[in-house]
Image (tube, rainbow, N blue to C red):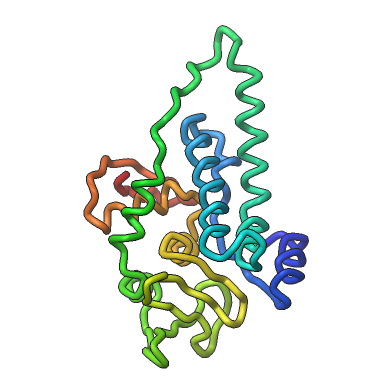
Amino acid sequence: MNSDLAKEIAAITGGPVYIVDAPPIAYDSKATTAELLREEEALHWHIAEAEREWGAYSMEARVTMTLVAKELQSITNEIHRRHLASSMPSAPRWPDDEPDKRAEWEEIKRRTDIVDLAERLIGGGQARGGLVWYRCFAHEDNTPSLAVYPNENPHFHCFSCQAHGDVIDLARGAMQLSSFQATLAILGEWAGMNTRTIVIQRGDEAIEVKT
C-alpha cells in the first residue's frame, strides 16, 4: 500500500490501516473508455452512499473518499487524455451514455445476505452479542476483529484496522478486486440476476463472471 495513503488514513482513523487490492483499472491499457466511465461513476456513487449512510462529515465517509481518491483521479485523468484525442480521425468512437446503474446496485445489495457472503469469502464466523465475528481480510488477524452487523443496515467493521462498508466493500476487499464492475458482476451472478458473460483479468488469472 502507498505509504502516504496509509499515513493519511491512519490520521483519520487513529490507527494503522492495511489495504489489500488489485491494480486499478486506470492503469489497464486494455480497459475501454466505456469501462473507465462506468468505474468513475461507480466510485462517485460509492462516496455518495457512504455519505448517505454515515453522514457527509463522518469518519467512514472521509475514509471512503481517501481510499478511492487516487484511483478516481487516475481514471479522470485517463478519460480526459482520451477525450482530447477523440477528435482525431484514427480515434475510436466515443461511447454513448449508459443508463444509471443505481437501481441494479441497490438490488444486488438487497439480495445479498452479508453473513452468507462473509462465510463464503472468509469463513469461520463466530456469533457473539448479536454480531458475527471474522478474522479480517485486510490484515493479519490472530483473533476475529471484523464484526458483521446483520441488521436493517447490513455492514461490517474491523475494530483493528477500521476497514468497513457494505456487502460490495466486503466482496471487493475479500476478493482483492479493485474494479467495482468486477465486484458487482460477481455479486450479481451469485444473486441470480439477469446477466451476460464477461471475463475479468486479475494478474495472470482470467475470471469468467456475469454482468
128 left or right, relative to 43 = left
Q: Which residue lies furthest to the top in this view?
A: 89
Q: If the image is split into quadrants, where does the N terminus sit?
A: bottom right
36 left or right, relative to 191 = right
Picture quadrant of residue 168: bottom left
Q: Which residue lies furthest to the bottom in this view?
A: 129
Please, is residue 145 above or below residue 191 in the view? Answer: below
Q: Please give the name of the residue rendered at 59% of the width and 40% of the height, measured from the top-left corner.
A: 26
Q: Please give the name of the residue rendered at 51% of the width and 29% of the height, measured from the top-left corner.
A: 33
What is the number of callouts on the image?
Answer: 0
What x and y, as percent, mark residue 116?
31, 73
What x and y, as percent, mark residue 161?
62, 76
What x and y, as percent, mark residue 58?
64, 66
Q: Please give the name of the residue rendered at 36% of the width and 70% of the height, measured from the top-left corner.
A: 114
User: Camera-side residue: 57 or 22?
Assistant: 57
Please, is residue 83 above or below residue 174 in the view? Answer: above
Q: Please give the name of the residue rendered at 51% of the width and 55% of the height, measured from the top-left corner.
A: 49
Please, is residue 73 above or below residue 153 in the view? Answer: above
User: Camera-side residue: 154 or 192?
Assistant: 154
Q: If the image is split into quadrants, where does the C terminus sit?
A: top left
Please, is residue 195 above or below residue 125 in the view? Answer: above
User: Camera-side residue: 34 or 167?
Assistant: 167
